[in-house]
Image (cartoon, grey):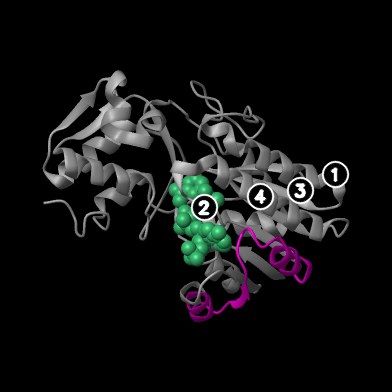
């Protein structure tokens, strides 16, 4: 397939591109800068210039493809509502270009905030509104294209997609532990965080492109939930700093934008996804990946 990939130069996209090429697909990646364009060319992809707010470029890229994987997202948590709105418009543009074609549109989303307190499944849909639900409108819009002749699906990723090059939650936790001199967790630290290795996530995007039925909500969670206390413990060991509880009332002050997410118990199953697509994630789990040392520049002492 000739696959149009947005966010192809990002942390996950740069794993999705070789995953697709190695499976015999052609990749056309969206690039908004010379740097990203050069990275895509080096990875063996064609370049389609444009940005997320250039809807004509998105429509043209999708129309000239046999399928789309949408990974680009503006990760500016100070203006998340704007990022979510840009994402929604981009999905509308990509989907409308594929309307009536039966071609696949695979859209990245997240599990955070899906159903705190119990194991969330693919059958759960998030509430719209603040918190993890801000991307709910995008997810619904993507799935709605199933009724308009698009084989659309969403891949809800664990909040920690980990591996070399990670610049998400785990590096931010490590930076906070370095800055504060303590590796913290909220309350008793029992809150569970789903996790998935970047290479396993990339494989899931390929499988979704190739065979997810229209309207599928899929889960990119290899581990249902790793207790935050254990993640903090691994970080503390590596940095040689104490591991300690942070009072829930002080979580926002201590962890900043991550406070609420760290306190939320959000275990998430991917059993239905594995059964549907034959996805078999096999890379190291989050704690094993932390023990490998690349997050810290080397293995623990
Ligand atoms: N990483 C995680 O732990 C995680 C967890 C849950 C969900 N997700 C979701 O998975 C998807 C991919 O995440 P990621 O970690 O790979 O993100 P990332 O490393 O931050 O990469 C973001 C990608 O989006 C592109 N992009 C950003 N703003 C753009 C714009 N205005 N126009 C065009 N392209 C733009 C970037 O291009 P440049 O190269 O030009 O910057 C880059 O290719 C996102 O939807 C993300 O929210 C990720």
How far across and how far down the image is residue 134, in percent?
58, 35
The residue sitting at 13% across, 34% down in the picture is 242
User: Residue extending furthest right?
Assistant: 100
Q: Which residue is mark 4?
A: 277
- Looking at the rendering, the stretch of residues picked out in magenta corresponds to 37-65
Instruction: Reply yes or no: does residue 53 show up in magenta.
Output: yes
Q: Compare marks 2 and 1 and give the one earlier in the sequence.
A: 2
What's the CA distance linking mark 3 and mark 2? 28 Å
Label 3: element kind: loop
Quarter of the figure with the N terminus: bottom right
Label 4: element kind: helix
| Closer to the eye: label 3 or 1 | 1
The residue sitting at 37% across, 31% down in the picture is 262
**Front-lying residue, 266 or 87:** 87
Q: Which residue is mark 2?
A: 74
Q: Compare marks 3 and 2 and give the one earlier in the sequence.
A: 2
How far across and how far down the image is residue 90, in percent?
67, 54
1 to the left or right of 70: right
Q: Is residue 13 above or below residue 89?
A: below
Q: Compare marks 4 and 1 and give the one earlier in the sequence.
A: 1
Instruction: Reply yes or no: does residue 263 show up in magenta.
Output: no
| Closer to the eye: label 2 or 1 | 2
Look at the numbered disc 2 and say if its residue's Cβ is closer than 8 Å to ligand 1.
yes
Mark 4 closeness class: few <14, some 14–19, many ≥20 residues within 10 Å: some
Q: Compare marks 3 and 1 and give the one earlier in the sequence.
A: 1
What's the CA distance linking mark 4 and mark 2? 29 Å
Residue 122 seen in render: yes
| Closer to the eye: label 4 or 2 | 2
The residue sitting at 50% across, 77% down in the picture is 34
Q: Which residue is mark 1?
A: 147
């Amino acid at each position: 397939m000739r696959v149009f990939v947005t966010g192809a130069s990002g942390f996950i996209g740069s794993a999705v591109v070789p995953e697709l090429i190695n499976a015999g697909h052609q990749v056309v990646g969206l690039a908004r800068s010379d740097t990203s364009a050069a990275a895509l060319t080096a990875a063996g992809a064609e370049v389609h210039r444009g940005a997320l707010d250039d809807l004509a470029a998105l429509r043209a890229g999708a129309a000239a493809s046999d399928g789309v994987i949408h990974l680009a997202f503006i990760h500016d948590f100070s203006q998340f509502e704007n990022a979510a709105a840009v994402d929604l418009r981009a999905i509308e543009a990509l989907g409308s270009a594929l309307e009536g074609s039966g071609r696949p549109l695979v859209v990245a989303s997240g599990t955070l905030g899906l159903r705190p307190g119990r194991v969330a499944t693919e059958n759960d849909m998030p509430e719209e509104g603040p918190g993890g639900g801000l991307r709910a409108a995008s997810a619904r819009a993507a799935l709605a294209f199933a009724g308009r002749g698009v084989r659309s699906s969403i891949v809800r990723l664990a909040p920690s997609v980990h591996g070399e090059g990670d610049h998400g939650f785990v590096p931010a936790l490590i930076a906070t532990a370095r800055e504060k001199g303590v590796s913290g967790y909220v309350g008793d630290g029992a809150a569970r965080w789903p996790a998935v290795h970047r290479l396993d996530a990339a494989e899931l995007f390929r499988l979704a492109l190739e065979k997810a039925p229209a309207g599928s909500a899929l889960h990119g969670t290899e581990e249902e939930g790793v207790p935050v206390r254990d993640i903090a413990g691994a970080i503390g060991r590596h940095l040689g700093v104490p591991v300690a509880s942070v009072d829930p009332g002080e979580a926002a002050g201590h962890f900043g934008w991550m406070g609420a997410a760290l306190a939320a118990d959000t275990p998430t199953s991917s059993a239905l996804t594995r059964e549907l697509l034959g996805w078999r994630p096999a890379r190291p789990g989050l704690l094993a990946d932390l023990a490998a040392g690349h997050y810290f520049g080397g293995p623990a002492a």
